[in-house]
Image (cartoon, rainbow, N blue to C red):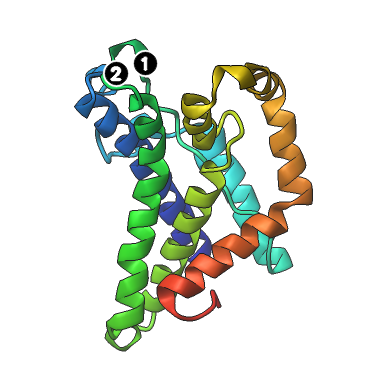
């Protein structure tokens, strides 16, 4: 049952992430995601078989066996046409919308967990709320890393001066290898940031 709850929470979180990319893009002049029917919380149009189901399912299963590990996933990216966007920093705003939606969800459930008698209402609610907070902080922090194809890279590229175009080219070509290196060798640093934010919001450690 806990396994299924984690899958549902992760799917909803990554879907919300993508929907907010599309909502902000539409508000800034690009209706591509809207025209493609992607501004919906119905998960079916957003699901990526590998990133939304198989990979997170495997990672969650392994974390249950080992008592820890990486839990991650993604939905199909919403289509965005940068040529339609209005504003100098529109691309960065669209990119930030996804991680910020996850942080907003984490704050909402985290503050409820901290200030409302959630556990008294139902014993099962407290762990569910905790997982929602934890997974959404993880999604936000991870996606804000300035490495392609993550959202943070689009924000970085928007503000990167022309004198650093060589860095942009390098990250565009080898970003996936840099990302894998971080996942395997520096994920504990990402986890420490997630743990810190969880404590800051909820007022207690994650389990």
Q: Residue 180 carries which label?
A: none
Q: Which mark is residue 85?
A: 2
Quadrant holding the C terminus: bottom right
Picture residue at 50% right of the left edge, 66% below the top = 197
Give 144 or 110, whichever is nearer the viewer: 144
Give 181 or 8, whichever is nearer the viewer: 181
- Image quadrant where residue 164 sits: top right
Q: Residue 82 carries which label?
A: 1
> Percent from the top left, x then y, of residue 109?
33, 67
> Percent from the top left, x then y, of residue 26?
23, 25
Give the Cα separation between the discs numbered 1 and 2.
5 Å
* SS type, badge 2: loop
Side of 75 relative to 28 (left or right)? right
The answer to whether one can see residue 36 in this image is: yes
> Percent from the top left, x then y, of residue 30?
26, 18
- Image quadrant where residue 126 sits: bottom left
Picture residue at 71% right of the left edge, 59% below the top = 188
Side of 60 relative to 129 (left or right)? right
Label 1 Cα neighbours within 10 Å, binned few <14 / some 14-19 / many ≥20: some
Query: Eyeballing the image, is 170 above or below 41?
Result: above
Give 28 or 58, whichever is nearer the viewer: 28
Picture residue at 39% right of the left edge, 55% below the top = 103
Query: Eyeballing the image, is 78 above or below 59?
Result: above
Count of numbered labels shown in the rendering: 2
Q: Do the residues labelled 1 and 2 touch (CB within 8 Å)?
A: yes
Outermost residue toward the bottom? 120
Picture residue at 47% right of the left edge, 32% below the top = 155
> Percent from the top left, x then y, of residue 22?
30, 30
Side of 118 relative to 160 (left or right)? left
Query: Eyeballing the image, is 199 above or below 178?
Result: below
């Amino acid at each position: 049952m806990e396994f299924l709850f984690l899958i549902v929470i992760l799917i909803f979180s990554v879907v919300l992430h993508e929907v907010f990319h599309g909502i902000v893009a539409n508000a800034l002049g690009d209706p591509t995601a809207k025209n493609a029917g992607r501004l919906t919380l119905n998960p079916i149009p957003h699901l990526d078989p590998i990133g939304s189901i198989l990979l997170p399912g495997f990672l969650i299963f392994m974390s249950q066996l080992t008592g820890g590990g990486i839990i991650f996933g993604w939905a199909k990216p919403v289509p965005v046409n940068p040529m339609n966007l209005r504003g100098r920093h529109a691309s960065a705003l669209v990119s930030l919308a996804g991680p910020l939606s996850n942080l907003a969800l984490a704050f909402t459930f985290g503050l409820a967990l901290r200030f409302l008698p959630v556990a008294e209402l139902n014993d099962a609610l407290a762990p569910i709320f905790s997982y929602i907070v934890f997974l959404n902080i993880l999604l936000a922090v991870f996606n804000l890393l300035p490495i392609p194809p993550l959202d943070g890279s689009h924000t970085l590229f928007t503000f990167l001066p022309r004198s650093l175009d060589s860095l942009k080219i390098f990250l565009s070509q080898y970003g996936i290898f840099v990302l894998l290196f971080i996942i395997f060798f520096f994920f504990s640093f990402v986890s420490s940031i997630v743990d810190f934010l969880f404590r800051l919001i909820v007022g207690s450690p994650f389990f």
